[in-house]
Amino acid sequence: YSAGVRFESGFAGDRTDLVLSGMRDFGEKFDVRVDVGYQDYDYGDTDYEDNTAASGIVAVGYRVATDTKLTAQIEGLSNRDLSQDVRLLARIDQRLRLER
């Protein structure tokens, strides 16, 4: 589990991020990961009232073999332009070994 806060200030304005993340293994085959983020942007004097964004990811992994893992991941985003954006990502990770 981890948590973090980041403060940035620069030419494009100020940004504050809050991130929470956790991962848990369920036996040798399954794992679950959850990531949640919240960002607050301050661009200075603008017409935008809402300069925030929230995001979240829930991922479930299944280890098919020693070097092969399947992952299904649901991603969500909410900001002033997208009140609700949800996506599904499925992937296969294959570890390749280059040995003699």
Image (tube, helix red, strand yellow):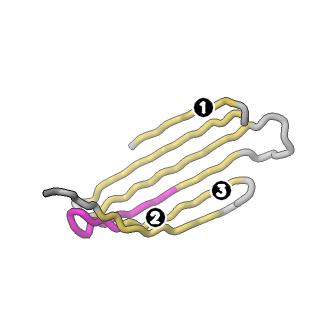
Q: Could you say whether the residue bearing mark 3 is in a helix, strand or loop?
A: strand
Residue 93 x, y percent position in the rendering: 34, 64
Is residue 64 rendered magenta in the image?
yes
Q: Could you say whether the residue bearing mark 1 is in a helix, strand or loop?
A: strand
| 3 vs 1, front mark | 1
Q: Is residue 38 left or right of residue 44?
A: left
Among the 4 quarters of the image, the one containing residue 65: bottom left
**Which residue is painted at 63% across and 64% down in the image?**
85
Q: Magenta region's main secondary structure?
A: strand
- The Cα atoms of the two marked residues, 2 and 3, are separated by 17 Å
Q: Nearer the viewer, residue 34 or 97?
A: 97
| Sequence-earlier tag: 3 or 1 | 1
| Sequence-earlier tag: 2 or 3 | 2
- State the mark number for residue 73: 2
Q: Is residue 10 left or right of residue 88?
A: right
Residue 75 x, y percent position in the rendering: 53, 61
Q: Is residue 23 above or below residue 87?
A: above
Instruction: Classify 10 Å Cα crowding around label 3: few (below 14), some (14-19), many (20 and above).
Output: some
**Which residue is painted at 68% across and 30% down in the image?**
10
Instruction: Please give the residue where the numbered disc 1 appears in the rendered image.
Output: 7
